[in-house]
Image (cartoon, rainbow, N blue to C red):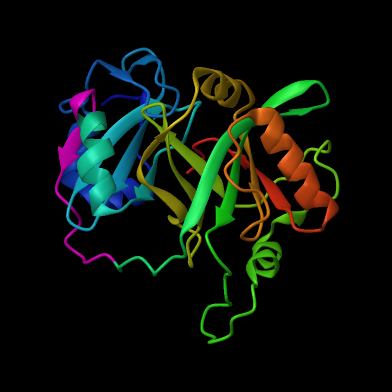
Amino acid sequence: MSSMLDVSNDVRAEIGEEEAARLLAGETVPGSYDCTSCRTPGDTAKERTSTVLFVGDETAVLAFAHAGCIPSQIVKVTEDQIQGAVRTIAAEGGASVPAPTAPLEPADRQAVLGVTCGQVLIDEQLFPAIVVEPNGPIARPGTDGTEDEFLALLTEAGFHPVADVAERPAAIEGWSVLLAMGKLHAVLQPGPDSSKSNSWWQAHQPLAVTDEWRVSANRTNTVLVYAAPAGSIGQQPREDMLRDALEGAAKSGRLAAAAMPLAGT
């Protein structure tokens, strides 16, 4: 039995005891792999390794990561994502496994959220950041109203109003940013039973980030997530312009933020 491999109870339940036993015995584990989080090499025989199960509607792919990067867990993604992005994970060291026999609940209809990546300087340290902005007003779920409730919904979920971009946002419980294969996949929030994560935002196609952004994210293991109502930020071509837009939104009381662990999915 491999004492270096971590298989969480959730992953074990999804793949079954037989497959879990084969993994732990080393029968289906690659000797080396590229960490699905930081993209650097790993060795299952020499360092603790997490099993990360990406689950779509019909397909599941098992990938591997340094235990110090992310714990063993299940990440729910769309079938399009798993057929595209996670196919690469399987080709570079993951293992396909049958999808769970129990049907997965379809993802709730989500508003269209635009995302911009950049770095923010706080206390002379660069932090990786993503800025989320809807393409229109966000009504409260279950209502027919037209009033934009985006900021109110964010603060109810645990985001914090931003008065000064120069201050680091506080952490939010249970949320995380999924960076896999060196690309941004999703912002995840706790599921209803807190045992699994659900996508709050997910890319239609994995979003490429700059090398500098990725290095900064791996160094801090934290991503600052800023969010503002439609029309507050816009698509800014440079980081200095993005910073100016963030400061403008903060001054007008239209910016919320939270610090999230990288790939703490």
Residue sitting at 45 percent across and 28 percent down? 67
Q: Is the magenta stretch mostly helix, strand or loop?
A: loop
Residue sitting at 42 percent across and 50 percent down? 202
Residue sitting at 79 percent across and 47 percent down? 248
Q: What is the quadrant of residue 159 in the picture?
A: bottom right
How many dots with numbers? Answer: 0
Q: Give the range drawn in magenta.
A: 91-104
> Does 196 sit above or below residue 167?
below
Q: Position of residue 20 (x, y in %)?
A: 23, 40
Q: Does the magenta stretch include residue 96?
A: yes
Q: Can residue 162 be seen in this view?
A: no
Q: Position of residue 226 (x, y in %)?
A: 66, 47
Q: Position of residue 177 (x, y in %)?
A: 52, 42
Q: Position of residue 95 (x, y in %)?
A: 19, 33
Task: Name the residue furthest bottom.
Answer: 144
Question: Which of these two is toward me, 97 or 1?
Answer: 97
Q: What is the quadrant of residue 164 in the picture?
A: top right
Q: Is residue 187 visible?
A: yes
Horizontally, residue 18 falls left or right of residue 69, namely left
Horizontally, residue 138 falls left or right of residue 2, namely right
Residue sitting at 56 percent across and 35 percent down? 117
